[in-house]
Image (cartoon, grey):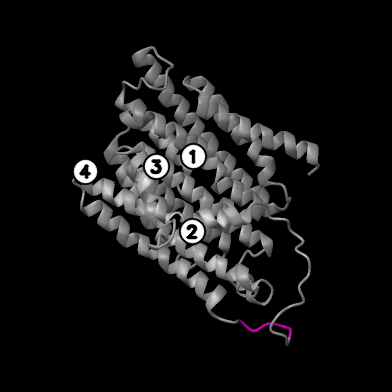
Amino acid sequence: MKPPILIIIMATIMTGTMIVMLSSHWLLIWIGFEMNMLAIIPILMKKYNPRAMEASTKYFLTQATASMLLMMGVTINLLYSGQWVISKISNPIASIMMTTALTMKLGLSPFHFWVPEVTQGITLMSGMILLTWQKIAPMSILYQISPSINTNLLMLMALSSVLVGGWGGLNQTQLRKIMAYSSIAHMGWMAAIITYNPTMMILNLTLYILMTLSSFMLFMLNSSTTTLSLSHMWNKFPLITSMILILMLSLGGLPPLSGFIPKWMIIQELTKNNMIIIPTLMAITALLNLYFYLRLTYSTALTMFPSTNNMKMKWQFEYTKKVTLLPPLIITSTMLLPLTPMLSVLD
């Protein structure tokens, strides 16, 4: 893809998301979603092959269905309230339809089936955009309509998403699919807290985006797409393999790392609201995620897989891929736990 075209497409994606985030009128929000969806498709098909074509088609169909549902919910709400304003959702059916549409856009269970398939069919760069930037717009709308969301429906979706995100990634060797299931699980944690404390959801989303960006950038450094190709990295980038180890543990939510902050705060907030069983179940199912992250760390950094050359280290060539902002991303993805008291004041 030529650079000017790429710049225009990326600008359209960003503009679409910005329109969604800054609008208080349902029609503008819908237009923003459509702009974003139509502009991301060429990015998904950047490296053209039948698999990317299939992934883009799946993405288009699910997003178009979600947009249609969202518009229907908005229309029902308009008939009942006469308002296009986002803050006025007077009808429970309209609220349920809007929530369903937005969860479909995010890839929460039971609408999660497209996420692993689409992520697996596209390049690492496109996958990174899909699992980070594309989550911002629907989340911002859920944040704005959080007072009128059906809590029981969202809690059920959240619990099943955490379960599916853990269960689905157990047997995977493809890194993009593992990241997709990880995304489903993280979205479940965010959905669980949104009706109780929306600000905490923003904190969780920020940390999730930082950790996912760092992971994808480390994978892109060596163009690793499978556990096997990742296991050969010790030979070329020994320091990077240890970074991947720490990042995976952070994604799993282990205590001394940044990934523990949202889990800790969400469990605390839910128990404050007299919920014991749901946060317990979520914490238990999060162990499934931790298992497949640990499997990745084991094959990457804790074992030396046989390699073709006799030397322990490959000849150090210059990095061919320039990965920007990696050091600050890794630091924020792993070392933010001491800032928890400050973050809890913000909430």
150 within the magenta span: no
Q: Which residue is mark 3?
A: 201
Few, some or many residues within 10 Å of mark 2 (<14, 14–19, 20+)? many
Res 100 → quadrant:
top left
Indicate the amino acid at tag 4. Answer: Asn
Q: Left of 216 or right of it: where is 27?
A: left
Indicate the amino acid at tag 3. Answer: Met
Q: Which residue is mark 4?
A: 273
Few, some or many residues within 10 Å of mark 4 (<14, 14–19, 20+)? few
- Front tag of 1 and 3: 3
Q: Which residue is mark 2?
A: 334
**SS at mark 4?**
loop
Q: CA distance from mark 4 to mark 1?
A: 28 Å
Please report contact status of discs 1 and 3: CB closer than 8 Å, yes or no.
no
Q: Which residues are magenta?
A: 305-309
In percent of width and height, residue 172 lies at 51, 66
State the residue lying farthest toward the bottom.
310
Please report contact status of discs 3 and 4: CB closer than 8 Å, yes or no.
no
State the residue lying farthest toward the left.
274
Q: Left of 46 or right of it: where is 184?
A: left
Q: Which residue is mark 1?
A: 105
**SS at mark 2?**
helix
The residue closer to the viewer here, 259 or 308, is: 259
Residue at the image position 78 percent from the left and 70 percent from the top: 317
Please report contact status of discs 1 and 2: CB closer than 8 Å, yes or no.
no
Indicate the amino acid at tag 1. Answer: Lys
**Residue 340, visible in the rendered structure:** yes
Q: CA distance from mark 1 to mark 3?
A: 17 Å
